[in-house]
Image (cartoon, rainbow, N blue to C red):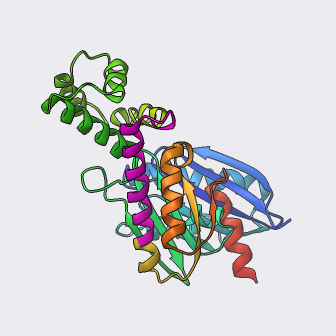
Amino acid sequence: MKYVIGVDAGGTKTEAAAYNLNGECIKSSIKGFGNLLNNTEIALANISDAITEIASDLGCEDLDGIYIGAAGAEVGNNSKLIKEKIQSQINVTVEVMNDAEIALKAMLKGKDGILTIAGTGSIAFGINSGRSSRCGGWGNLLGDEGSGYKVAICAIQRMIKEEEESLPQSKLTKSILEKLQIECVNDITEFVYSSTKDDIASIAPIVARLGEDDDYISKNILCEQGIELAKTVEKLYKKLGFESCSVALVGGVIRKAKVVRSAFENYLRENMCIDEIVDDEISPTKGAYYIYINQSK
């Protein structure tokens, strides 16, 4: 029974999965991080171990290709290092791409389009007729529009505005102070400058909840960030010369924050020709199956 292996190698874990030619997952393996920027030697070993565990069990004679999506693959010669490592162990076609590309292929079933990620950070990645590009993904200091981090920072800036302009404390400000267990807005700086991005982004669900309860201030922040994220997609849409395309969504903010999602979708549909918006829960490793099937046509 012929099969292919897909790999999603990220900053925290490496997931490998084998798919038969009907697209069914027949075996999987999970190892440690696969981003070579963390540690080249360990990341290569984790990617290799995940693949060889599957290949040893299913046999190499029916293995028809390995497709690896790795965070940081586009940096330096990382892609080459991964390919050489795997091909030195298994004599089969190996393709290496960044992790966004294999996720896009998985969600859009091998078709071209745009992948929008909005969790703690944000980025849009797209492919059109062999050309790939991105917009966003510049990190929390330079961008991350529509992300949990950006929503949280906008909420904190609103708290500061109320403090400096002697405005009544809003429901948003009171809710954040309560969550952080601090008594006054002046103490917010200690939290911001001593916390990780994830810690700061943990405020975003408060904003999302209040926005859904029709709190005016929270709703405005969420709508603004949803539109800014959509504008990031719009820039990429134009950059890649799409006449129409589907958009895949990944990340807790764009999937779960209803106000952000609504503003995002409304802007897209008003300003671009969108075929479909896809937010299915699917393993990026399945991108290998769709890439293989499309190449075989």
| Viewer-proximal residue among 225 and 248 | 225
Position in image of residue 209 (x %, y %): 49, 33
Residue 226 on the magenta segment: yes
- Residue 82 sits above or below residue 57 on the image: below
Residue interval drawn in magenta: 211-234
Kindly indicate the quadrant of the structure image that contains residue 8. bottom right
Answer with left or right where residue 5 lies relative to residue 132. right
Position in image of residue 66 (x %, y %): 64, 66
Specify whether residue 33 is in view.
no
What residue sits 69% from the left and 67% below the top? 109
Farthest-out residue, left: 164
Secondary structure mostly seen in magenta is helix
Specify whether residue 131 is in view.
yes
What residue sits 34% from the left and 38% below the top? 152
Position in image of residue 116 (x %, y %): 50, 60
| Viewer-proximal residue among 236 and 60 | 236
- Residue 169 sits above or below residue 14 on the image: above
Kindly indicate the quadrant of the structure image that contains residue 81. bottom left
Residue 159 on the magenta segment: no
What residue sits 35% from the left and 32% below the top? 199
